[in-house]
């Protein structure tokens, strides 16, 4: 039976649910001119949640509700960064949403519900919780993508996302049902990931398990956006309003890593020889498709979408190693990627104004003359994404490459660096446009004077340099989570 | 305070770049003077380094080592030997000259230009004193960023093509080195270069690692056939960019060979020495001929750089041949020293040549040889310097260009007279392409009316050229201090060549 202790373990989640409901009510009863305060309230809610996550972290792995929910270091780190990047997205989004009359309560509550989904997902101890978290996150995301109702592109993207997402959820569920069959069909407790882990050793139906596993990998691949399950990414990234894209490119990726880790290592760890190869294939496909297709993009958001696909390829390099070092490297990569993509999209948000989305690469022409500081921040983000030292992105890449070599997959590491060279081109192209081209006639480029946006964005981009110079503590933190 | 002298040398220009950048485009003069101040202070610090370094003691000195990333055992490790000290001195010396050289020339965003130069200088110094392989790699790659910006913003008409080619080409080489380093980390559990040097490796491993290192450094040197980025980068780069590129950045490649290929893969290095020697000879002879037909002055000097760097790689790998096949350590040491002297000498000579071309370019805005002719009539002092550096470039005794080449040819002769014969070709070809260019640019009658309007060099340019001339003549006439500085380190390198690691 649930007791008080269970509730304490879930305190941050309960608190967020309550806060989100309260925000919904406030939004309904507030006078329109007071609604602006919702923005700061939502950020405060997220910051308090970060505090609750860190302060309430037990020294050992705690489980609640009969193992449905796991609270360990891995969940703690992922939650802190998911909450943090979401708060950053809110700060960056405000001026953009005001310009477009999209600053509504729904945006904030949907974001918070999506974060709750992330938190459940990364703490899942049971297939049911995995599915619950995933659906909460996905449904909130579909609605967020469709936030700009009047835009045909947004609606199209939302429908695509929804249809493909539903298909992927179906696949995942089908895989889970197979696994359930192999696990002895003992009701909800037999769906616990720890139970599945035990089943592996004495199961009589390994074929059934592997069959289920394949469908679960499809679900994971979809959530990560790894090729060949990447079809939704470019359209959604381009079609969604930029703040929503930023969220999908940051917090969502942390969730996808958490989900992959829980399902693959937590539930199917003993089948690792099977899924290692599957992930390696997904990694190579993502690296190839992401990097090659990104080269020809002219739309910055779409280019960053393909860049996401390639980055998920690198993340899979760490996961495919199937070792604690590999998981630590992959988690480090997920954190690094979320910080980089928030910074890159943040610059787009800072430059966009009403009637000017700043989403074509050519829109950035001559940014160094118009706004040298924004150009510099984007330069940091681009070099970091490209993996040029001393920026943060390089170390994350080095870590996953090392993990792959450690796991005896030298060939995979070589494929990884070859595509890093190819990928370099399109990031350099953005820098070229900003620094080497003259501003276009009547260029509208101008950074928003919004102070919180500028301060947080500057700190965000400079953190890529700072963490690049001193990434030891973050790595140690990630490694302790995996018992290293 | 001397405990952190190396950190000071790295961080002073890097951090000093921030106030220069903050001075902004509104206060260009403040940015210029600040940059000069930082460069002079860095040079002063490097002189202090020279005083602190004991050449006779040998080994790595002024060691700084702090745990940087405990989980990976990465150290922030710095130390210098004689080779590093010489290269750092050259870097800081050239650092001042490029800033003075760009004073009025760079009118577009001078603060960013100066800041990028300082950043570059600090990172290059870092490369020359890193003792941790991962730190070395990070700095080795990071120098691409300011150089990319320098060529891309202030370069010539095809700057975008040139700078992208430069960046991607160099990046291409170095990622394989990263894989090799990560592999070595698997075996040794550390990135400390001294530990990696002592790590036993099978021939198969050494061969793979050797080629991974080789591709990284060969592109940087650059060696034939991966030199094609250099002429483009040089032609399009602003004068200061070309000077730093030729004088310091190319040395990073050969320095890397000394620090990685020699100690970590000595057996593979000895086994494939013939390959490097062959490629070096191709660089010396064939690229010499290529330089002969160039019509663009910068391209000509760029190709002559490839040929001269061929001497450095020849000197390093001829030492392998001498030690492993003949046990002739004395000659091997001569070859190694020749390579080291050539590295320093080429830094000054090529830097000076590019400065001279820059001086002419600022007046006439063309680099085509055919647009000039009779420059000596209007710029006699400039002519004096130009001829001096041209002589040094063709290896005339009494200039620094002679010393290193002579030592390498001597060592080659001991190894195999045929190698020496081909290497000695440079004395003819080098003289041919350099002096022919001088003839067409300086001498003769003025045919282009614009040449008649060219003004004599001003005080600032005279200062820069005099400084280069002093260095070129000092090394040429009295190389002893430089050789002494690097003597024990060269000996150490030669000793490493004999170590079998299998």
Image: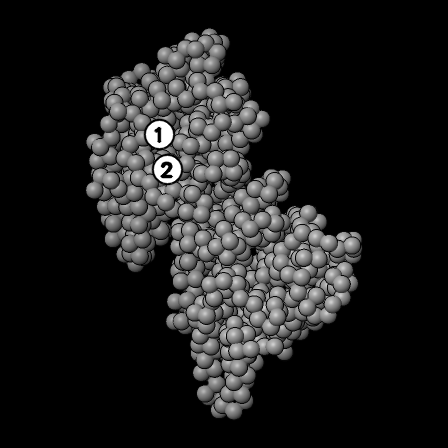
Q: Can residue A323 be seen in this view?
A: yes
Q: Dot 2 surroundings within 10 Å: few (below 14), some, or many (20 or more)?
A: many
- Percent coordinates x, y for residue A371 in the rendering: 41, 62
Residue B241 position by quadrant: top left
Identity of the residue drawn at 43% across and 65% down: A457
- Percent coordinates x, y for residue B389 in the rendering: 32, 25
According to the picture, the residue beneath numbered tag 1 turns out to be: B347
Q: Dot 1 surroundings within 10 Å: few (below 14), some, or many (20 or more)?
A: many
How far apart marks 2 and 1 lie (CA) works out to 21 Å
Q: Which one is nearer the viewer's eye here, A73 or A245?
A: A73
According to the picture, the residue beneath numbered tag 2 turns out to be: B130
Q: Which of marks 2 and 1 is nearer the N terminus?
A: 2
Identity of the residue drawn at 61% across and 60% down: A262
Label 1 sits on a secondary structure element that is helix
Label 2 sits on a secondary structure element that is loop
- Percent coordinates x, y for residue A429 in the rendering: 53, 51
| Position above or below: A48 against A463 | below
Identity of the residue drawn at 45% across and 53% down: A476
Identity of the residue drawn at 49% across and 48% down: A394
Q: How many labels does the image show?
A: 2
Q: Which chain carries label 1?
A: B
Please state which of the two labelled residues, at mark 2 or mark 1, is closer to the viewer. 2
Residue A187 position by quadrant: bottom right
- Percent coordinates x, y for residue B102 in the rendering: 31, 43
Q: Is residue A429 visible?
A: no
């Amino acid at each position: 039976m649930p007791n008080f202790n269970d509730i304490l373990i879930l305190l941050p989640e309960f608190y967020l649910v309550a806060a989100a409901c309260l925000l919904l009510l406030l939004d309904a009863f507030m006078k329109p001119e007071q609604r602006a305060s919702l923005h700061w309230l939502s950020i405060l809610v997220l910051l308090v949640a970060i505090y609750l996550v860190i302060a309430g972290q037990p020294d050992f792995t705690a489980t609640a509700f009969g193992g449905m929910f796991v609270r360990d270091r891995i969940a703690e780190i992922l939650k802190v960064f998911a909450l943090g990047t979401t708060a950053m997205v809110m700060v960056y989004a405000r001026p953009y949403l005001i310009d477009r009359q999209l600053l509504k309560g729904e945006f904030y509550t949907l974001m918070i519900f999506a974060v709750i989904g992330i938190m459940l997902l990364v703490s899942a101890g049971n297939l049911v919780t995995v599915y619950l978290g995933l659906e909460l996150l996905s449904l909130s995301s579909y609605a967020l993508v469709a936030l700009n109702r009047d835009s045909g592109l947004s609606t199209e993207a939302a429908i695509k996302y929804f249809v493909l997402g539903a298909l992927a959820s179906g696949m995942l569920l089908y895989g889970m049902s197979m696994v359930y069959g192999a696990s002895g069909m003992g009701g909800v407790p037999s769906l616990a990931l720890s139970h599945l882990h035990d089943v592996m050793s004495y199961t009589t139906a390994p074929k059934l398990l592997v069959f289920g596993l394949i469908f679960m990998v499809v679900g994971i691949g979809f959530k990560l956006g790894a090729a060949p399950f990447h079809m939704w990414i470019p359209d959604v990234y381009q079609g969604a309003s930029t703040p929503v894209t930023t969220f999908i490119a940051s917090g969502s990726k942390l969730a996808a890593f958490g989900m992959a880790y829980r399902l693959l290592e937590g539930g199917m760890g003993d089948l690792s020889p099977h899924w290692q190869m599957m992930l390696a294939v997904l990694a190579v496909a993502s690296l190839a498709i992401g990097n090659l297709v990104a080269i020809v993009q002219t739309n910055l958001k779409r280019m960053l979408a393909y860049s996401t696909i390639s980055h998920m390829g690198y993340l899979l390099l760490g996961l495919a190693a199937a070792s604690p070092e590999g998981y630590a490297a992959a988690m480090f990569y997920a954190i690094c990627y979320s910080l980089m993509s928030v910074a890159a999209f943040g610059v787009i948000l800072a430059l966009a104004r009403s009637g000017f989305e700043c989403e074509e690469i050519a829109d950035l022409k001559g940014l160094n003359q118009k706004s040298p500081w924004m150009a510099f921040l984007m330069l940091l983000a681009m070099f970091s994404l490209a993996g040029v030292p001393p920026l943060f992105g390089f170390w994350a890449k080095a870590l996953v490459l090392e993990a792959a070599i450690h796991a005896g997959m030298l060939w995979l590491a070589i494929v990884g660096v070859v595509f890093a060279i190819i990928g370099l081109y399109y990031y350099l192209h953005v820098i070229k446009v900003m620094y080497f081209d003259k501003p276009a006639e009547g260029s509208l480029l101008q950074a928003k004077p919004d102070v919180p946006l500028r301060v947080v964005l500057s700190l965000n981009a400079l953190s890529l340099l700072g963490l690049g110079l001193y990434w030891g503590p973050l790595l140690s933190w990630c490694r302790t989570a995996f018992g290293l | 305070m001397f405990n952190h002298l190396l950190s000071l040398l790295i961080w002073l220009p890097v951090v000093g770049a921030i106030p220069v950048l903050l001075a902004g485009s509104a206060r260009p003069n403040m940015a210029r003077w600040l940059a000069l101040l930082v460069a002079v202070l860095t040079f002063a610090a490097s002189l202090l380094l020279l005083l602190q370094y004991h050449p006779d003691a040998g080994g790595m000195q002024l060691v700084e080592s702090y745990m940087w990333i405990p989980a990976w055992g990465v150290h922030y490790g710095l130390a210098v030997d004689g080779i590093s000290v010489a290269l750092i001195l050259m870097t800081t010396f050239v650092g001042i000259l490029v800033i003075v050289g760009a004073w009025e020339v760079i009118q577009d965003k001078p603060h960013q230009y100066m800041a990028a130069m300082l950043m570059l200088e600090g990172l290059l110094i870092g490369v020359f004193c890193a003792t941790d392989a991962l730190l070395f790699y990070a700095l080795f790659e990071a120098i691409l960023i300011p150089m990319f910006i320098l060529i891309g913003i202030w370069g010539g008409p095809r700057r975008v093509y040139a700078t992208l080619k430069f960046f991607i080409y160099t990046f291409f080489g170095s990622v394989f080195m990263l894989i090799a380093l990560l592999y070595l980390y698997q075996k040794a559990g550390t990135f400390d270069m001294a530990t990696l040097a002592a790590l036993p490796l099978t021939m198969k491993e050494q061969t793979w690692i050797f080629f991974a290192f080789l591709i990284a450094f060969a592109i940087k040197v650059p060696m034939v056939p991966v030199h094609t980025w250099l002429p483009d980068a040089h032609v399009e780069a602003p004068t200061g960019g070309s000077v730093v590129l030729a004088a310091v950045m190319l040395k990073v490649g050969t320095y890397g060979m000394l620090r990685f290929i020699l100690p970590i893969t000595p057996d593979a290095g000895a086994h494939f020495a013939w390959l490097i020697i062959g490629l070096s000879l191709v660089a010396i002879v064939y690229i010499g001929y290529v330089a002969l037909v160039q019509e663009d002055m910068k391209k000509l000097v760029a190709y002559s750089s490839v040929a001269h760097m061929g001497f450095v790689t020849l000197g390093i790998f001829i030492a392998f041949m001498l030690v492993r096949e003949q046990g002739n350590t004395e000659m091997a040491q001569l070859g190694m020293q020749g390579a080291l002297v050539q590295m320093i000498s080429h830094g000054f000579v090529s830097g000076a040549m590019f400065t001279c071309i820059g001086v002419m370019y600022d007046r006439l805005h063309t680099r085509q040889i055919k647009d000039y002719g009779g420059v000596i009539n209007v710029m006699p002092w400039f002519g004096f310097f130009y001829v001096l550096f041209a002589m040094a470039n063709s290896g005339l005794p009494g200039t620094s260009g002679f010393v290193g080449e002579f030592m390498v040819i001597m060592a080659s002769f001991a190894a195999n007279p045929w190698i020496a014969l081909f290497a000695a070709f440079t004395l003819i070809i080098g003289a041919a392409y350099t002096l022919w260019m001088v003839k067409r640019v300086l001498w003769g009658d003025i045919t282009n009316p614009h040449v008649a309007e060219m003004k004599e060099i001003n005080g600032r340019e005279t200062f820069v050229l005099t400084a280069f001339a002093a260095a070129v003549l000092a090394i040429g006439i009295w190389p002893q201090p430089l050789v002494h500085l690097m003597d024990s380190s060269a000996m150490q390198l030669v000793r490493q060549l004999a170590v079998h690691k299998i």
